[in-house]
Amino acid sequence: MLLHALLGGVVFGCYFTLIGLGLNLVFGVMRIVNLAHGDVLMLGSFAAYFLFHLAALSPLSAAPLIVIGFFLLGLPFYYLVVPRLAASRDAEMLSFILFFGVQQIIEALAAIAFGSSERSIPARVLGIGAVHLWGQSLPRAWVISALVALAAVLALYLYLYHTRLGLLTRAVMASREEARASGIDIHRVSAIAFGIGLALAGLAGVFAPFMLGSITPAMGSTINLAAFAVIVVGTLGNPLGTVLGGLVYGVGLLMMQTYLSAWADLLPNLLLILVLLVRPSGLLGRRVRLA
Amino acid sequence: MSPEPLLEIAGLVKRFGGFRALDGVSFSLGPGEVLGLVGPNGSGKTTCINVISGLYAPDGGEMRFAGRPLGGNAMHRRARLGINRTFQSPRPFASLSVRQNVELAAFYGHAEGPRADIPALLASLDLDSLAPRRAEDLNSAQQKLLDLARALATAPRLLLVDELAAGLNPAELARMAERLRALARGGMALLVVEHLLGFLESVTDRVIVMNAGREIFEGDLSAAVRHPEVVRVFLGSDHAG
């Protein structure tokens, strides 16, 4: 039972890493808090749902379309909102308010458009049967979702550390002012990072029906809480630190569901309170936050 | 005959809420000239550099560079035009090496002509032995030198220097002063914000003294220290003649 909880926790941890990854990238590059992150994920879920039910497109085929679509949506949205926000004297605080409004609008429009009933995509579309690891069996959909999440982490790592645009992104993360003085167009770099952030949220949304059970227009708030717990544990502003936060969250969740199931829903709150009290800079500390 | 101005500032205003950090500042600066900007804390010196470099947008006034209005050019565009700056508290790209920090600026902030010779630039600032090290491993004096190297890598025609001397020992101060003089001899215009008047005196004799966002004196540094208004601002009304 312990081994199953641990293995399942690691698998869920990979998925929760994907949930927090885009949010942490956006915070790291722009120092703004996208409270609508969970609702973007919800839109990704509904996009996958409709592509499956209306166009018979499997989630694995829909994922690249959703990633590209959300990335492209992110670019104009960035230029519409963020430069003005970044120029204000308290961008972090204002971003809370602004994106809270965006979150409310997305949720309300989604409820009008899709209704409030729970929807799902059958797990069999990702393959039938279980995956056996060290004598434990895990649903195939979980493992595929985790593998996609790991692929996304690897892609982000390659982007940040092995491309010129990634180098510029890390420079902007380290110091926006020095980056501007070095001739770097920080809005171009940030717009791309914002687009990637939305694309990662959309991708996480595609696999939400398999990992979270069902999807509704109201799921964004719950997702946000989990995403914040993951990135605060893994260190705010350090996208790759999200992996650590995701694993702690995933293993913690599965352990609690196994041994303290009545308390499992409290995990994000407990983690947030614990980390903020004991190690507010996150498990990796501030040092790694500096790109 | 004085050279054609490279930078012309007229009636520059910058407000933060109801506070006027710059209140109608005007001056001009030609190629090869060094102008010192002094004043008590909060007098608007760094704000002036922030506005000219494009970090802040002005609320009024005009700025012309090489005869053209600077307008709403963003900071990275001004770097490419030939305006660069150092920071009072530099925050280099911590996980990148010293060389990478400078190379980034040389690649993206350079306007035209041949690119900066990075090894020579690093050697001229005694940073050559530190080139492979991560910027976060440098001490604060070394980070200031790196910041200067980053700015010079863009081959600026106008360099805005914000309290570069703070934290340097006497020998380093003398070397830094000679470096700035050499840059001016090469035709670069320098606007130098500085609290250390001895250091400033070794770099230029022309200063603007600011207080509460306004210029209260422009002229020789030796005359400034005898000017009643300047004495009052720095030492209080008991000392003013």
Image (tube, coloured by chain):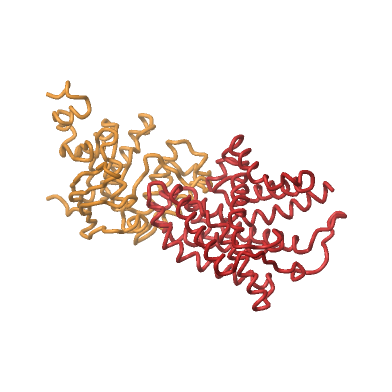
- Between B217 and A107, the residue placed more toward the observer is A107
- Between B20 and B234, the residue placed more toward the observer is B20
Q: Which residue is drawn at the image coordinates 47% and 65% (left, top)? A: A75
Left or right position of A225 against A248: left
- Residue A159 picture location, percent across and down: 57, 60
Q: Quadrant of residue B69?
A: bottom left
Q: Which residue is drawn at the image coordinates 61% and 34% (left, top)? A: A278
Q: Which residue is drawn at the image coordinates 47% and 53% (left, top)? A: A30
- Residue B209 picture location, percent across and down: 20, 37
Left or right position of A69 against B199: right
Q: Is residue B117 visible?
A: no
- Residue A263 picture location, percent across and down: 72, 44
**Count of numbered labels shown in the rendering:** 0
Q: Is residue B183 above or below residue B70?
A: above
In the rendered image of this protein, which colour is used for chain B? orange
Residue farthest along the bottom direction in this orientation: A55
In the rendered image of this protein, which colour is used for chain A? red
Q: Quadrant of residue A57?
A: bottom right
Q: Is residue B137 above or below residue A61?
A: above
Residue farthest along the right direction in this orientation: A135
Left or right position of B158 against B138: left
- Between B28 and A276, the residue placed more toward the observer is A276
- Residue B183 picture location, percent across and down: 30, 46
Q: Which residue is drawn at the image coordinates 60% and 55% (left, top)? A: A21
Q: Quadrant of residue A163?
A: bottom right
Q: Is residue A199 visible?
A: yes
